[in-house]
Amino acid sequence: MRTSIWCGLVVMLTSWAAAQSAPSMVGPVPSTPVPAVRGTLEGKVKAEWEAFKNKDQKTYAGLLAEDFAGIEDDGEGMRGKRAAVGEIDRSVVSKYYLFALKVLPLAGDSALVTYELTMEFPPKAQLRFKRVLVSELWLKRDGQWKLRHYQETRVR
């Protein structure tokens, strides 16, 4: 009986020790340092909204991955790259305010970006301001960061 208890204790301690020295299961370390990723993606998010404000389809399209999927709070469902770029001509965003931007590097060359955005529309617009919480998935493909997924939730 004593031998089996000691054997069980040895197995448990050995398993615990192996688990402590095992590599983390979180995933590979991002290939780009965190501050660099944050600065790059913050610039990309600002470029995204500048393109919308300035109705610059070419710049906006260049930021999106070919397999982009976006979901806005308008109830129209998911839209691909082509539809998202087409919306720029109908945009009436005159100003925007970014707040609380956070970048969470994920495994490899990917990052989750979250922020709060307030859009301001022209004085004669029926809706003057719209505030949303945004989550974006950015992927580094062929050395370029591309927006793969966009999701917004309206703040009332």
Image: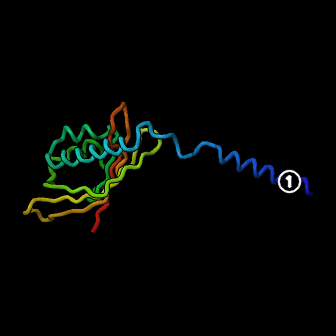
Q: For the residue labelled by badge 1, is the local secondary structure a helix, a strand or a loop?
A: helix
Identified at 27% across, 58% down, the residue is 99
Residue 58 picture location, percent across and down: 19, 37
Residue 48 left/right relative to 128: right
- Amino acid at pointer 1: Trp
Q: What's the colour scheme? A: rainbow
Identified at 16% across, 59% down, the residue is 120
Is the C terminus in the top left, top right, bottom left or bottom right quadrant?
A: bottom left
In the rendered image, the vertical position of residue 80 relative to residue 125, given as above or below: above
In the rendered image, the vertical position of residue 33 relative to residue 120, given as above or below: above
Q: Residue furthest bottom?
A: 156
Q: Is residue 75 visible?
A: no
Residue 129 picture location, percent across and down: 18, 63
Identified at 24% across, 47% down, the residue is 46
- Residue identifier under label 1: 6
In the rendered image, the vertical position of residue 31 relative to residue 11, given as above or below: above
